[in-house]
Image (cartoon, rainbow, N blue to C red):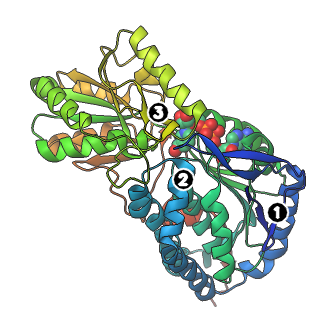
Amino acid sequence: MEQIVNYIDGAFTQPLSKSWLDNYNPSTGEVYSKIANSNAQDIAKAYEAAEKAFPSWSNTTIDERSRILLKIASLIETNLVDLAEAEAKDNGKPLSLAMTIDIPRAASNFRFFAQAITQFASEAHESVGLNSMNFTLRHPIGVVGCISPWNLPLYLFTWKIAPAIAAGNTVVAKPSEVTPMTASLLGKIISEAGLPKGVLNIVHGTGSSAGQAIIEHPNIKAISFTGGTKTGEHIARTAAPMFKKLSLELGGKNPNLIFADCDYETMLETTVKSSFANQGQICLCGSRIFVEESMYEQFKKDFIEKVSQLKVGDPFNAETNLGAIVSQPHLEKIQSYIKIAEKEGGKILFGGKRVTVANLEKGYYLQPTVIEVQDNQCRVNQEEIFGPVVTIMPFKTEAEALKMANGVQYGLSATLWTNNLDRTMRLSKQIQSGIVWVNTWLNRDLRTPFGGMKNSGVGREGGFEALRFFTEPKNVCIKYNNQ
Ligand code: TXE
């Protein structure tokens, strides 16, 4: 059986423990490869390689770093089909999604930061009248840790790594143990692109062993993490006493506010996507849908009709809209929330059941599920489910919609559907989330700040924000003699 091994100091290496984890194909429910179950010693080796590579990489010209990152981007594109197939198999997402979103975006991440670093400048402040001049140096931090989740495996892995190495850091990175395959293929690509050995070290394994060793390592001074809010809290507790720099991109429970004055057809089509893209396993999915009362019944009917047309099935079938849920435990977690909804008095308007796909009977398939709820305080409206489950409920006034939108512990993104400019401005200012989309969803410009408020995280990535995170600013103040 194929083994997914670590990539440390430019070489593929077995885990020191010689222990392995099972890697499941969620569309068949079967184990199809073995993953290195790395421990603190593997992380220590990865750290040593990264530390050794740092002096030279941090002094490599911006032009040269940029050239290598562009080469990585091109090689990802050359390998588009192989990477997309690997992603679909490892994660269960439709191949069409991996081909059009995940892998192209991984290439864009490298291309974007290859270019952004050439424009990344620092500030100067002249202290007029005091005969002094300040300028800011932005040093790379050193060895940094990047830990990523399973929902958008290569997309989010590269979202962290690209700015980290563009800024001159060296990296110890761990993809999710649930979806390690494309990160492992990236090892081959970076070596072909000529990234010097030790600049990027990819270590596989569980969060509690390999991940924990990264966050506990005293000399890994910055951690960029995307994953669950509970894990983020644990990372913050562990890292804070060591004064590590942290960027935490955590869960969401994003509201969709739909007003009667919106462009109905565009809203309807986009809302189906924002509910169920990637089986609802995107932190930006709009899982709470609030609809203005005057159009609620119409929306309910049309939405359910559209949802009922979605095809759940083999990720490799071009007709498939929803592939498999990422893992058996995650499927069970989602199903448990559907039960909770029923107990709480929610009405399942569509879905709620496991789907058996012919020839893939053991795969983890679930119907897209729409639940009508009475109260925003119910658990299915308050807790992140992270699956193909959305709730809908009506609202009477803008104030009530805003109160429900903000009435959760999360604050990652929100989507507003309205053609009223005054309302757009009022709500955009008052909604508590890191991103507000108006009449669109998942519309991303990589220059913009990305991240959440409240329990959705700390810090921003994207554009210069990411380059600022991965550098340490130092002010230099020079006093001069004016005579
Ligand atoms: O995430 P974890 P899980 C949410 C979603 C999901 C829940 C749990 O609600 O149901 O989180 O998912 C690593 N030290 N999101 O359990 O555990 C882990 O190995 C260091 C939202 O899969 O947070 C993996 O690489 N690292 C989310 C990464 O953290 C640790 C995407 C994420 O895993 C660690 C995924 C530790 N102690 C889940 N423990 C989003 N915001 O997009 C785990 N990890």
Label 1, label 3: how many angstroms apart (C-alpha)? 34 Å
Label 3: few (<14), some (14–19) or many (≥20) C-alpha neighbours in 10 Å = many
Whichever of labels 2 and 1 marks the residue nearer the N terminus, that label is 1
Res 105 seen here = yes
The amino acid at mark 2 is Lys
Label 2, label 1: how many angstroms apart (C-alpha)? 28 Å
Of residues 184 and 403, the one drawn nearer to the viewer in this rendering? 184
> Farthest front residue?
359
At numbered mark 1, what does the secondary structure look like: helix, strand or loop?
helix
Above or below: residue 454 compared with residue 22: above
Label 2, label 3: how many angstroms apart (C-alpha)? 31 Å
Of residues 40 and 248, the one drawn nearer to the viewer in this rendering? 40
Label 1: few (<14), some (14–19) or many (≥20) C-alpha neighbours in 10 Å = many
Q: Left of 36 or right of it: where is 146?
A: left
Residue 470 image point, x, y percent: 63, 63
- Quadrant that contains the N terminus: bottom right
Instruction: Say which residue appears at 32% left-offset and 41% top-offset.
Output: 311
Residue 394 image point, x, y percent: 21, 22
Above or below: residue 170 compared with residue 373: below
Q: Is mark 3 within 8 Å of ligand 1?
A: no
Instruction: Say which residue appears at 48% left-offset and 49% top-offset.
Output: 451
Front disc: 1 or 3: 1
Instruction: Say which residue appears at 48% left-offset and 28% top-offset.
Output: 409
User: Which label is found at residue 397?
Assistant: none
Whichever of labels 1 and 3 marks the residue nearer the N terminus, that label is 1
Location of residue 327 by image quarter? top right
Disc 1 and disc 3 in contact, CB within 8 angstroms: no
Q: Which residue is mark 2?
A: 89
User: Which label is found at residue 46?
Assistant: 1
Q: Which residue is mark 3?
A: 410
